[in-house]
Amino acid sequence: MLLFPLEPVRAQQPNIIISQDATVPGESAYGRYMRLGYAAAQRNDHRVAAGYFRNALAEVPGDEEATIAYWNSVDALTGEAVDGTGTETENDYESYMEIGYDATEQEDYQTALINFRRALLERPGDYYASQAICNIRTYINLGQDPDSPTDVEGLPNACPGDSAYDYYMRLGYAAHQREAYQDATEYFEFALTERPNDRAAIIAYWNAKDALSDPETSTADESSYDRYMRIGYDATEQGDYQTALINFRRALAERPGDSYATQAIRNVKTYINQGQ
């Protein structure tokens, strides 16, 4: 009987399964929420993802990456905001914005500011709520109503202390929200000229480019609604509020009840009233 030496048996490494919910050593709360949010988004659990990204924003308010990720998840859930008649039901965001605009028209700026801030909590990073807050702060800081729209430089589109980058990013997000993807792409390009290789601007730019190339979101010709909204926004930037008002009303006629056209009309009416 022949005996052969046995090969030494190597201990097997145990299979260690780390739960996604487990805390990674040295990981911040913000990093954990972002990691869990992206994991939820990958498995198409967008409601959970939105919750994690909102928590991340609570840790780092105004963070651009978390804001983008949050709205990407919210966009994936937009179908759930439609009721049985096919029209979007009023939510807390819209209610706060409505109260804020009404208070602004009545020159009750503190009430307006409170409600616009509440709206921003409902939709972190939202352009319209952010813009409204900027405008109200301008009125309050002046201590009195401006004699004319031109007395407040850049009132329709810029906040005090805004950088060119911030300005272009806010306009880009607004254009993306109203599905004007070509305009959004151009604004994000301008933002990138201010901050080359900026992560948030790059992500936003390619999101807009992807939307342009998607046959379900892009059209060969600009619709009448988009054209009127574009003309209206351009006129607003130039301080030509009457032209802006006319075109926003035309846009609303194309899409009765449209929230973007309605809010734009309210904004312009406020600028006109402040100039009287």
Image: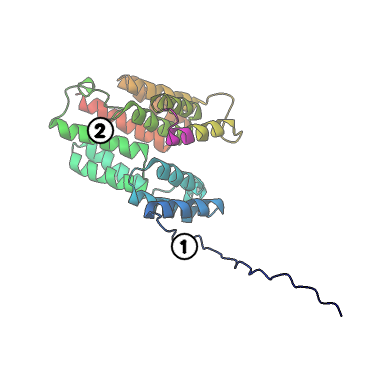
**Magenta stretch in the rendered image:** 196-204
Residue in the image at 52% along x and 48% along y: 79
Residue in the image at 32% along x and 46% along y: 61
Q: Is residue 202 magenta?
A: yes
Q: What x and y, as percent, mark residue 266?
A: 31, 33
Residue 91 vertical placement versus 162 (above, below): below
Left or right, 62 with reference to 87: left
* Residue tagged 2: 135
Q: Is residue 187 magenta?
A: no
Amino acid type of the residue that numbered disc 2 sits on in the rendered structure: Asn
Going by the picture, which residue comes out furthest to the bottom?
1
Quadrant of residue 135 within the rendered picture: top left
Question: Label 2's element?
Answer: helix
Q: CA distance from mark 2 to mark 1?
A: 43 Å
Residue in the image at 54% along x and 31% along y: 209
Looking at the magenta stretch, what is its main secondary structure? Answer: helix
**Crowd class of label 2 (few under 14; some 14 to 19; many from 20; radius 10 Å):** many
Going by the picture, which residue comes out furthest to the left?
143
- In this view, the residue in front, 244 or 230, is 230
Left or right, 134 with reference to 22: left
- In this view, the residue in front, 33 or 222, is 33
* Residue tagged 1: 22
Residue 218 vertical placement versus 8 (above, below): above
> Counting residues from the N terminus, which is met first, the one under dot 2 or under dot 1?
1
**Crowd class of label 1 (few under 14; some 14 to 19; many from 20; radius 10 Å):** few
Q: Quadrant of the C terminus?
A: top left
Amino acid type of the residue that numbered disc 1 sits on in the rendered structure: Ala
Q: Quadrant of the N terminus?
A: bottom right
Residue 111 vertical placement versus 239 (above, below): below
